[in-house]
Amino acid sequence: MSAGSDRHLRALELPVVDAARMLVGCTIAYEGCCGVIVETEAYHEAEPACHAFAGLTPRTRTLFEAPGIAYVYRSYGIHALLNVVVEPAGVGAAVLIRALEPLAGHGEMFARRARPLETDLCSGPGKLTQALGIGLGLNATSLLDGPIRLGPPPSDRPPPAVVTGLRIGITRAVELPWRFCAAGSRHVSRPWPPGLLAAAAGSSRG
DNA sequence: CATGGGATTGACT
DNA sequence: GTCAATCCCATGC
């Protein structure tokens, strides 16, 4: 078994923050479209930005399922956001997939997105689900043998260096550095926060 | 049962 | 930079 070929499986065994970091570089595939994960965020029931903070409710039920399940929910009444459920069943935690670098299915993705730039195809949590055609009906399906497939990094693309930053678009627990981006990727939803933890990239400055 | 608030995006000034 | 679109659900009366 070559190194990295089970990276996605190993990630599912880890605490959510480590899983989020480990999933950068892995792949998401659905109906002929595929991309490399270049941005993730971690959410855990112990902190108030996580939906599971409210406890086990109809909305959060999926978050408490076994690792490797997809949590897909509607955001702002408009968008579907894709998460990878992690940590043991009974613990509410998931990794939000925030951006992909498109690998396959560009034609379909362009058609669904109707945007001209390749770097803008999947550069956001709502954008990538629209590009891949992932809807709320896929909530609670398996990412290992279900319609959406979580896979290891492509063999010709070793996992990238990872930049750590603050999560985006939340109002609670904003101080937690639980956002992870592939260093230097042009496919992320937004540049990482000014200064702060960006030093992990090695050379980025502003 | 009424209400408020989003893990966002795209269009516009 | 600002702002509307749009809907599920958690909360409160």
Image (tube, coloured by chain):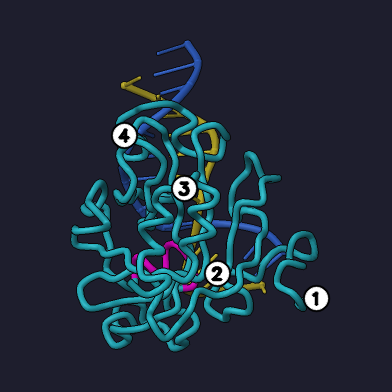
Chain colours: A cyan, B yellow, C blue
Element on which disc 3 rests: loop
Label 3 crowding class (10 Å Cα cut-off): few <14, some 14-19, many 20+?
Answer: some
Which label sits in the foreground, 3 or 4?
3
- What is the magenta range? A123-130
* Label annotation for residue A205: 1
Label 4 crowding class (10 Å Cα cut-off): few <14, some 14-19, many 20+?
Answer: some
Residue A41 image position (x, y, % from top left): 53, 54
Element on which disc 4 rests: helix
Residue A125 image position (x, y, % from top left): 45, 62
Q: Are marks 3 and 2 on the same chain?
A: yes
Q: Residue furthest front?
A: A1
* Label annotation for residue A14: 3
Q: Residue at x 75, y 60 (%)?
A: A197
What residue did someone put label 2 on?
Answer: A189
Above or below, A48 relative to A201: above
Element on which disc 2 rests: loop
Q: Quadrant of the C terminus of chain A?
A: bottom right
Residue A147 image position (x, y, % from top left): 19, 62
Asked whether the beta carbons under mark 3 and mark 4 sit within 8 Å of each other, the answer is no
Say which label, 3 or 1, has the lower sequence index: 3
Examine the structure image and report whether residue A177 is included in the region drawn in magenta: no
Say which label, 2 or 4, has the lower sequence index: 4
